[in-house]
């Protein structure tokens, strides 16, 4: 039986459909636990809450944490309190979608830097802010994913940010995937790519396949992080290349000792003629800087000092 005066009954209903708060008794519409449960399901439910709760700043902070939509159901005058607005955006950056409509908050740098933790809020910021390179750098430092949007914008000189070398370096250092958003002209700039990969080897994962074939880029990544070897195309991952990789980063030996990663690595290596490989082992064994050699035909690690093989499996 329906009983909209019963708290348990109402709680059960608003958790399934927030707007069912409409049918709750007056006392339950003023109950914080009930209203918060309703807002969590549907922010629009705040419209059916008692006015005392819709003007309670502490309660509204709790509501904003559940759904920024709930802020649409309060009087705009309440947003005149800047410290209150900062708290709202701190608990839920999407609160900026509502707050930015009032009191020129869309151009407030402090509030924008709090909001940018959700990169979609950039669309609600005053566009003149993006003419300031220093502010743009601050945005990227707070949330590197903002570069996806920022990369299409222009600075005060009319230059697009995806061509700004210093910004590209910052963005890719903080998030390697940002290499996807730089200008096409720079995506094939070998010196720049080496610089970016040296700063963040993960960048190598996201460059074009043709660029991954560049031995210089592959070795630059491996030098910084041994596991990047697993991202090198098999067509260039020959035994001779592997020897060079060992030379720039001896930590590859630890990679080999990890059985699961070893299997991945073995599948990456180009299958070579056993006779040629054995001849190469003899040549390479003269260089004591190498700790091991991989024979991808037999899946063995060779000690160049003794030329004895240890099975990987």
Image: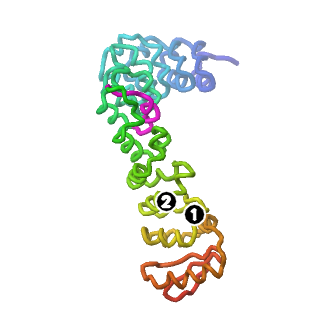
In the picture shown, does residue 178 fall above or below 313?
A: above
Left or right: where does residue 18 sit relative to residue 30?
right
Looking at the rendering, the stretch of residues picked out in magenta corresponds to 143-156
Which of the colour schemes (rainbow, by chain, secondary structure, one colour) is used? rainbow
Query: On the image, which quarter does residue 119 sit in?
Result: top left
Query: On the image, which quarter does residue 310 sit in?
Result: bottom right
Instruction: Mark 2 and mark 1 in contact? Answer it, CB < 8 Å.
Output: yes
Q: Residue at x 47, y 71 (%)?
A: 246
Q: Is residue 152 magenta?
A: yes
Q: CA distance from mark 2 to mark 1?
A: 9 Å
Front-most of residues 32 and 229: 229
Whole-percent x, y for residue 154 in the image: 38, 27
Residue 69 visible in the picture: yes
Q: Residues within 10 Å of mark 1 (few under 14, many from 20)?
A: some
Whole-percent x, y for residue 221 in the image: 45, 58
On residue 218, the disc is 2
| SS at mark 1 in the image | loop
| Sequence-first disc among 2 and 1 | 2
On residue 180, the disc is none
Q: Residue furthest right?
A: 1
Q: Residue at x 44, y 26 (%)?
A: 121
Q: Is residue 155 magenta?
A: yes
Left or right: where does residue 99 sit relative to residue 208?
left
Q: Residues within 10 Å of mark 2 (few under 14, many from 20)?
A: many
In the picture shown, does residue 255 fall above or below 197?
A: below
| SS at mark 2 in the image | helix
Q: How many marks?
A: 2
Whole-percent x, y for residue 34 in the image: 52, 23
Q: Residue at x 47, y 28 (%)?
A: 120
Q: Which part of the image, by quadrant, shows the C terminus?
A: bottom right
On residue 236, the disc is 1
Whole-percent x, y for residue 257 in the image: 53, 73
């Amino acid at each position: 039986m329906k009983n909209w005066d019963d708290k348990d009954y109402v709680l059960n209903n608003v958790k399934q459909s927030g707007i069912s708060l409409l049918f709750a008794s007056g006392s339950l519409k003023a109950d914080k636990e009930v209203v918060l449960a309703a807002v969590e399901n549907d922010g629009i439910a705040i419209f059916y809450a008692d006015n005392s709760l819709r003007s309670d700043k502490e309660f509204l902070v709790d509501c904003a944490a559940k759904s920024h939509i709930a802020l649409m159901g309060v009087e705009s005058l309440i947003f005149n309190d800047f410290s209150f607005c900062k708290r709202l955006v701190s608990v839920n950056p999407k609160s900026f979608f509502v707050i930015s409509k009032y009191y020129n908050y869309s151009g407030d740098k402090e509030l924008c830097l709090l909001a940018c933790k959700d990169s979609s809020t950039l669309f609600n910021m005053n566009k003149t802010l993006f003419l300031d390179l220093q502010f743009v750098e601050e945005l990227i430092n707070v949330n590197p994913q903002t570069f996806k949007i920022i990369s299409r914008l222009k600075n005060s000189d009319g230059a697009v940010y995806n061509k700004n070398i210093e910004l590209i370096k910052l963005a890719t250092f903080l998030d390697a995937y940002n290499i996807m958003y730089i200008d096409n002209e720079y995506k094939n700039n070998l010196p720049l790519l080496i610089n970016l990969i040296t700063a963040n080897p993960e960048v190598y994962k996201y460059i074009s396949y043709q660029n991954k074939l560049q031995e210089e880029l592959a070795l630059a990544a491996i030098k910084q992080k041994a596991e990047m070897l697993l991202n090198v195309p098999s067509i260039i991952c020959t035994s001779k290349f592997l020897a060079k990789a060992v030379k720039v980063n001896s930590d590859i030996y630890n990679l080999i000792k990890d059985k699961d990663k070893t299997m991945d690595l073995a599948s990456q290596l180009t299958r070579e003629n056993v006779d040629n490989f054995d001849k190469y082992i003899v040549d390479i064994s003269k260089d004591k800087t190498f700790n091991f050699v991989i024979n991808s035909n037999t899946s063995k690690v060779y000690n160049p000092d003794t030329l004895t093989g240890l099975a990987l499996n």
